[in-house]
Image (cartoon, rainbow, N blue to C red):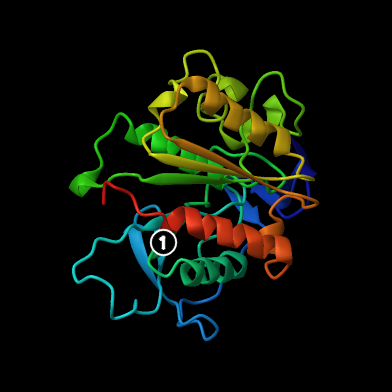
């Protein structure tokens, strides 16, 4: 998984051109380290603020607050909150990344009744994920919703919906760039390798997907995304599981992986934003 020492006490990691592994086992990132400060976005009026979650490990979140709602909004009305897990394969990027900061400002503005929070994952070490900048946000969101099925959330919180955008899951057999060696490098404590339920929701012994702790799911796919078929299999696995909630799918024609982040102003990205905002804005009877 690693090449020879480059002379600076670091090794290049095969399959991870944006990482260097140091002799002490830590990792230096060569990409995805740019950040922008929280601010009031001049284009949307959305205000953002950074808050720590677990200071000891560096886990934090950036909160996004849309402009005040119309005066006609009911006083004391409960509003849902969007929790957004950024991508980057658990290796790069952060909640303060210019790419995700721009997207969350736009999302908060498109769904103004939904305050949002982007969670900054600890990336000083390596955690469960996959190489080549595959987006793990859908995978993380899914696993959090599965965990919520067996663990009570604080303050009576409920997960209303799940949006899995260009998600990566492993279904055996599958055509993927992911290899057992890659997974072992990212998640060395995973005894079952690619058959860990957090990566393969259909693995032997994995919890039934019907237990997903939310009422609605939207799976977003892109026609030219190399991960499209794996995302489709996730959608189909939910269908077969007996999931009793509302299951929706959006497939963007002619587009590749994370096109909505790379080309946020294109027509297809705008269509996707409208669909996601509408899904998030649908009022639940449980609120």
Vertical order, 21 against 271 (above or below)? above
| Quadrant of residue 1 within the rendered picture | top right
Picture residue at 28% right of the left edge, 73% below the top: 73
Vertical order, 35 against 148 (above or below)? below
The image shows residue 235 at horizontal and vertical percentages of 58, 32
The image shows residue 109 at horizontal and vertical percentages of 48, 72
Vertical order, 238 against 25 (above or below)? above
User: Would residue 126 appear left or right of 148 to someone viewing this image?
Assistant: right
The image shows residue 283 at horizontal and vertical percentages of 35, 54
Nearer to me, 96 or 166? 166
Q: Residue furthest top?
A: 204
- Res. 120 visible in picture: no
The image shows residue 44 at horizontal and vertical percentages of 51, 80
Judging by the rendered image, the residue that carries numbered circle 1 is 117
- Res. 70 visible in picture: yes
Picture residue at 61% right of the left edge, 54% below the top: 92
Rate crowding at label 1 as few (under 14), some (14 to 19) or many (20 or more) other CA atoms within 10 Å: many
User: Would residue 117 appear left or right of 138 to someone viewing this image?
Assistant: left
Q: Residue furthest front?
A: 72
């Amino acid at each position: 998984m690693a090449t020879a020492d480059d002379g600076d006490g670091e090794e290049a990691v095969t399959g991870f051109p944006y990482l260097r592994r140091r002799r002490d086992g830590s990792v230096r990132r060569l990409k995805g380290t740019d950040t922008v400060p929280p601010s009031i976005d001049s284009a949307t009026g959305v205000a953002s603020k950074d808050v720590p979650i677990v200071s000891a490990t560096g886990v934090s979140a950036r909160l996004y607050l849309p402009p005040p709602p119309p005066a006609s909004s009911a006083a004391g009305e409960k509003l849902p909150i969007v929790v957004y897990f950024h991508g980057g394969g658990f290796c790069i990027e952060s909640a303060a990344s210019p790419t995700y900061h721009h997207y969350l400002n736009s999302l908060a503005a498109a769904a103004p009744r939904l305050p949002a929070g982007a969670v900054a994952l600890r990336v000083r070490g390596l955690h469960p994920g996959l190489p080549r900048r595959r987006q793990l946000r859908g995978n993380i969101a899914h696993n959090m919703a599965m965990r919520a099925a067996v663990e009570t959330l604080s303050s009576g919180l409920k997960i209303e919906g799940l949006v899995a955008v260009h998600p990566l899951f492993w279904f055996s057999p599958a055509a993927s760039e992911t290899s057992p060696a890659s997974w072992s490098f990212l998640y060395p404590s995973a005894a079952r390798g690619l058959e860990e339920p957090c990566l393969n929701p259909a693995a032997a012994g994995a919890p039934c997907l019907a237990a997903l702790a939310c009422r609605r799911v939207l799976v977003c796919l892109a026609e030219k995304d190399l991960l499209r078929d794996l995302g489709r299999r996730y959608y189909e696995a939910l269908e077969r599981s007996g999931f009793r909630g509302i299951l929706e799918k959006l497939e963007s024609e002619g587009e590749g992986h994370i096109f909505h982040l790379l080309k946020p102003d294109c027509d297809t990205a705008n269509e996707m934003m409208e669909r996601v905002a509408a899904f998030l804005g649908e009022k639940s009877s449980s609120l």
